[in-house]
Image (cartoon, grey):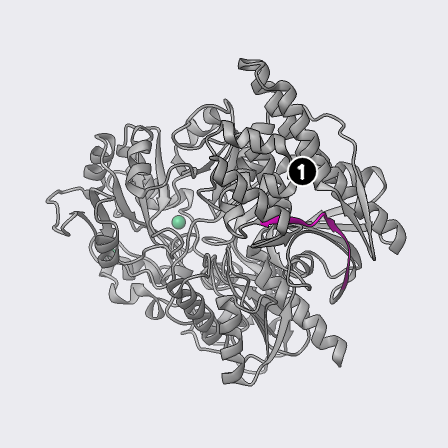
């Protein structure tokens, strides 16, 4: 029986109500002592007969905490009277940066409770919920180091803050209508619209058809009702890309198929956008022309209040940004950049210090790692060196490894313009500062001319860090597992060892030694990137067949255009070579006329998946080509087969033709998946491996993923996909760190 001790708790212990939780347990168990935040850990000095029970409670932690370790040290001093929460001090910062937390059910009750101080208040929060990362200036997480510092607590808030019996005891974001942030509704000139209730007014404006920019937790959304979808598309010059929607809980189940896992994710403290299959695949065409729809539940008190006044069942809520640029966080920027796009602005005066987009999840797999999940912290031993991974070009973020933890930033975006590069640099610098990190290794993509590669080089020069280039698809495998495995990476584009465009790759070995043992057939992309934008070019690149030119002519291509394309492919002039999986899917989408011009990343492949949803795959034969050291799957044979079936069905008209297109789409996906699985199974047999890791953006395609899984499991192998990081390029910066750590270790 111990009666005293110094307890050190490490893990996610800030911004989760840890100190008030400890306080409440201490008071309940008659423990005397103190609790203090030191940045990366909570330090508790405790005396009392029931020390062991207290220790057990503390080791469990409050709801949102994640505890890595609990250490008990001897304690000689004598106890103070009672139990006290001490002021935070900055200790060693091992990377505890709390993510933003969606409103909790008790706070929802508070804002709808007549007579409550929080009734109708848009910035209500408690120890269990509210903004965190988005408002942090520096660590440890305490009000004075957040953007809440400009809102001194009123006496009532001060009373709750110090009341150990209250849910807002030591809630750093506590605020009320008297002392906290305020909302205002503005017109396009930035003039305040006079109203006693800006939220109610905004709801009526939305119901009446206005398009409103709404400042939320991590940035601005653009919101409107479903009826205004086409107007919004016209204003944003965005024709095809699906919008995300915020939906009332009772409406969501009627719109989409929501599994228990999906519900748990939708209602979790993250409240992400969940990509769900529509009940009727053709419903809500203005929002999404795919068979899926991205839905989220109201996650901030502001959203809850808005929906309480709104007549519409759902709102389109799309991030406010210029295409390819970071989300807008400041009202001045919003007024300048959204001119002509929105009719009103609903904004507040709590500064957003760190931008954070909505996270996106599909089938429990992360598509966009951001609000509520990031900064993401993973415990992993990559050795003693501090490492920065700067990410690739698309869907980038950064990861910093230090002292046994990898910290991944929220989604940054497509780092192919200076403002997004600056945002990447700021994000890295801010998190580096918080962690007190000093880079010894900087990992970057193999691509020599990515902006992120340039950033890595400049930073290495400045800091004397060692540069480690990491091949894109191997970084995908590294993000998935450090075990010996076969790695399948299927995506759109990544720079290969030979300078060609890779994207359908199979590796064998163990990080950092992965041999490329197979891939998709290398095919020409006529006109390079132009073939990505216009997939009909890709179609002819893969299958230079007269019949394809005839199809293109029927669709309005001129003789001259067809002639130029044919000569390009024949002579190999201005073509890039690729083994990309995405480009094959694009080509089939083009053949079927589903997508003739790509207007957003991944569009042709996503529309092909939607078309295939109602189809039945046929058993198409698979053709393989032997190349030195690698087995190659002939994608040309797949496209040839697809062409044959397409021509056969052409002219049958109506539902029969549509069914044939769905079957061709399903068969093409199925064949690709079986081809990849086949090479992986061969590789596993040849190398004596059981584990098969699957990554890359194409792996979000449920049909392809499920077919690969079925094929490899039939042969007794285990398929793993990463559920902690995105399968797309949002896992690359983490994979780069893992790879670089393994390289360093190999040299020691
Ligand atoms: Zn709460
Ligand atoms: Zn107050």
The tally of labels here is 1
**Residue 264 visible in the displayed image:** no
| Residue 341 in the figure: left or right of residue 505 | left
Q: Name the one closer to the observer, 163 or 130.
A: 130
- Above or below, comparing residue 75 to residue 580 in the picture: below
Q: Position of residue 675 (x, y in %)?
A: 76, 40
Q: Quadrant of residue 158?
A: bottom left
| Residue 667 in the figure: left or right of residue 247 | right
User: Could you classify mark 1 by the number of other residues whose Cα lies within 10 Å: few (under 14), some (14-19), or many (20 or more)?
Assistant: many
Residue ID for mark 1: 704
User: In which quadrant will I find the N terminus?
Assistant: bottom right
Give the extent of the magenta segment.
514-525
Residue at the (73%, 61%) spot, across then down: 482
Please identify the dominant SS of the magenta region.
strand
Q: Position of residue 121 (x, y in %)?
A: 26, 47
Q: Position of residue 432 (x, y in %)?
A: 48, 74
Residue at the (62%, 33%) spot, across then down: 546
User: Can residue 8 be found in the magenta stretch?
Assistant: no
């Amino acid at each position: 029986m111990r009666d005293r001790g110094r307890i050190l708790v490490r893990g996610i212990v800030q911004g989760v109500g840890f100190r008030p939780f400890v306080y409440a347990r201490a008071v309940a168990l008659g423990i005397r002592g103190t609790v203090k935040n030191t940045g990366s850990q909570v330090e508790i000095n405790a005396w009392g007969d029931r020390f062991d029970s207290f220790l057990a409670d503390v080791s469990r932690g409050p709801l949102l905490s994640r505890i890595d370790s609990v250490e008990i040290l001897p304690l000689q001093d004598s106890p103070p009277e009672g139990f006290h929460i001490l002021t935070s001090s900055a200790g060693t910062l091992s990377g505890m940066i709390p993510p933003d937390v969606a409103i909790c059910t008790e706070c929802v009750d508070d804002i709808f409770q007549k007579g409550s101080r929080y009734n109708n208040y848009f910035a209500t929060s408690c120890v269990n919920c509210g903004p965190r990362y988005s408002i942090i200036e520096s660590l440890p997480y305490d009000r004075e180091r957040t953007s809440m510092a400009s809102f001194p607590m009123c006496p009532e808030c001060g009373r709750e803050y110090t009341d150990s019996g209250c849910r807002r005891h030591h809630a750093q974001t506590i605020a009320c209508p008297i002392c906290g942030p305020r909302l205002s509704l503005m017109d396009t000139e930035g003039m305040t619209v006079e109203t006693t209730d800006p939220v109610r007014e905004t709801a009526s404006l939305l119901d009446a058809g206005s398009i409103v920019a709404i400042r939320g937790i991590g940035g601005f959304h653009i919101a409107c009702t479903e009826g205004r979808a086409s107007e919004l598309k016209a204003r944003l010059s965005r024709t095809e890309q699906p919008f995300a929607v915020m939906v009332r809980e009772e409406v969501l189940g009627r719109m989409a198929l929501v599994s228990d896992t999906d519900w748990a994710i939708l209602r979790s403290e993250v409240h992400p956008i969940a990509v769900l299959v529509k009940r009727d695949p053709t419903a809500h065409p203005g929002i999404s022309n795919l068979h899926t729809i991205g839905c989220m539940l109201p996650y901030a008190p502001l959203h809850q209040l808005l929906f309480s006044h709104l007549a519409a069942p759902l709102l389109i809520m799309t991030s406010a940004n210029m295409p390819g640029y970071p989300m807008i966080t400041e009202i001045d920027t919003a007024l300048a950049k959204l001119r002509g796009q929105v009719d009103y602005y609903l904004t507040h005066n709590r500064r957003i210090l760190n931008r954070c987009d909505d996270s996106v999840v599909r089938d429990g797999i992360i598509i966009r790692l951001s609000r509520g999940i990031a900064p993401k912290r993973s415990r992993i031993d990559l050795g003693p060196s501090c490492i920065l991974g700067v990410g690739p070009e698309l869907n980038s973020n950064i990861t910093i490894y230090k002292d046994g933890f990898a910290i991944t930033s929220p989604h940054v975006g497509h780092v192919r313009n200076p403002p997004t590069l600056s945002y990447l640099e700021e994000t890295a610098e801010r998190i580096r500062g918080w962690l007190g990190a000093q880079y010894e290794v900087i990992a970057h993509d193999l691509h020599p001319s990515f902006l992120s590669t340039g950033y890595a080089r400049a930073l290495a020069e400045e800091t004397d860090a060692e540069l480690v280039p990491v091949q894109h698809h191997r970084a995908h495998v590294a993000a998935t597992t450090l075990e010996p495995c076969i790695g399948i990476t299927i995506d759109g584009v990544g720079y290969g060892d030979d300078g060609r465009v890779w994207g359908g790759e199979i590796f064998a070995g163990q990080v950092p030694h992965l041999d490329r043992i197979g891939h998709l057939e290398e095919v020409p992309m006529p006109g390079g990137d132009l073939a990505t934008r216009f997939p009909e070019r890709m179609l002819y690149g893969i299958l230079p067949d007269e019949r394809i030119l005839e199809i293109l002519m029927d669709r309005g291509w001129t003789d001259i255009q067809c002639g130029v394309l044919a000569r390009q492919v024949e002579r190999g002039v201005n073509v890039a070579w690729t083994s990309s999986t995405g480009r094959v899917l694009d080509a089939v989408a083009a053949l079927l006329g589903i997508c003739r011009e790509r207007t957003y990343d991944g569009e042709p492949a996503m529309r092909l998946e939607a078309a295939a949803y109602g189809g039945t795959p046929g058993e198409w034969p698979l053709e393989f080509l032997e190349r030195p050291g690698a087995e190659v799957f002939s994608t040309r044979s797949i496209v040839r087969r697809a062409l044959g079936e397409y021509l056969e069905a052409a002219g049958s008209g109506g539902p029969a033709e549509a069914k044939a297109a769905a079957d061709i789409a399903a068969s093409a996906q199925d064949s690709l998946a079986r081809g990849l699985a086949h090479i992986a199974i061969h590789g596993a047999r040849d190398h004596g491996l059981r584990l098969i890791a699957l990554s890359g953006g194409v792996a979000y395609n449920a049909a392809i993923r499920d077919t690969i899984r079925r094929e490899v499991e039939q042969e007794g192998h285990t398929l793993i996909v990463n559920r902690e990081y995105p399968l797309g390029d949002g896992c690359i910066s983490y994979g780069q760190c893992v790879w670089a750590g393994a390289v360093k270790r190999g040299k020691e």
